[in-house]
Amino acid sequence: MTIRLEKMIPLPMLEQDTSGSEVWEAESLLLNQGESYVAEAPSGRGKTSLLSVIYGIRTDYQGAVLMDDRDLTSFTTKEWSRIRKTKLSFIFQGLELFNDLTALENIQLKNRITLFHSDERILEMAQLLGVDPFLKRKAGILSFGQQQRVAIIRSLCQPFNFLLADECFSHMDLENSLTAYNLIREECEVRNAGIILTSLNKTELPNAHKRLKL
């Protein structure tokens, strides 16, 4: 799968100085399945907007975005539903967890729809990320860093060609960030999926991705 931006820029970004941006100033930007990209920039440079446009939840932009050479604006609501179940997974900056459900219930909500991972694999991922002791606690009482790790596991419980991750390591220390990133890379390599990651600051993650200057 490919995602191509053709002179695409969110309308709010038209009021800002975008000179030097490899995304907003590009005539054409091609994002390929199987490759990893990281967009690093301060707040207000459009990181969340970029992912939201690709995911189809923002349409206030100029230019065009194409998925496998088809313009996103041509997809029906039913097609978008299928795409979000099988082609794109999103780790939202706000995480979108249900606070009154346990961490495990939040993960299982998606996995019961997709039947993608076994219970054993979910527990294995939770142990790897150090959240297995908290799986039966309500998500709302977990720290934000713990919630981020739960949201990461949930995002991996579906098939996808691209994983969109919006500042998903912002409340983790370096060790936990590296562990979570390596899990994401491992899961993406198994399904030959691409990663589009945003970050507020220059990351210290393994240099196995292409940097996109916003």
Image (cartoon, rainbow, N blue to C red):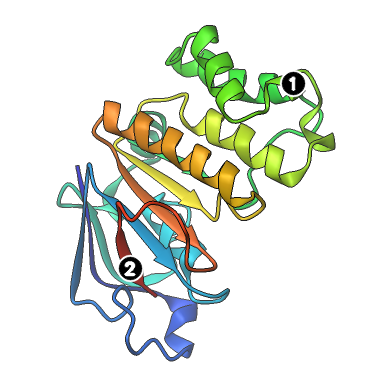
Question: Label 2 sits on what residue type?
Answer: Leu
Say whether residue 161 is left or right of residue 176.
Answer: left
Is the residue marked by circle 1 packed among few (<14), some (14-19), or many (20+) residues within 10 Å?
few
**Residue of label 2:** 212
Residue 151 quadrant: top right
The residue lying at 48 percent from left, 71 percent from top is 46
Q: Eyeballing the image, is 22 above or below 81? A: below
- Are the residues at dot 2 and dot 1 in contact (C-beta closer than 8 Å)? no
Of 9 and 45, which appears nearest the observer? 45
Of 181 and 158, which appears nearest the observer? 181
Question: Label 1 sits on what residue type?
Answer: Pro
Say whether residue 105 is left or right of residue 49.
Answer: right
- The quadrant of the rendering that contains the C terminus is bottom left
The residue lying at 73 percent from left, 33 percent from top is 98
Question: Residue 162 location, x and y as percent?
Answer: 33, 42
**Residue of label 1:** 133
Q: Secondary structure at mark 2?
A: strand
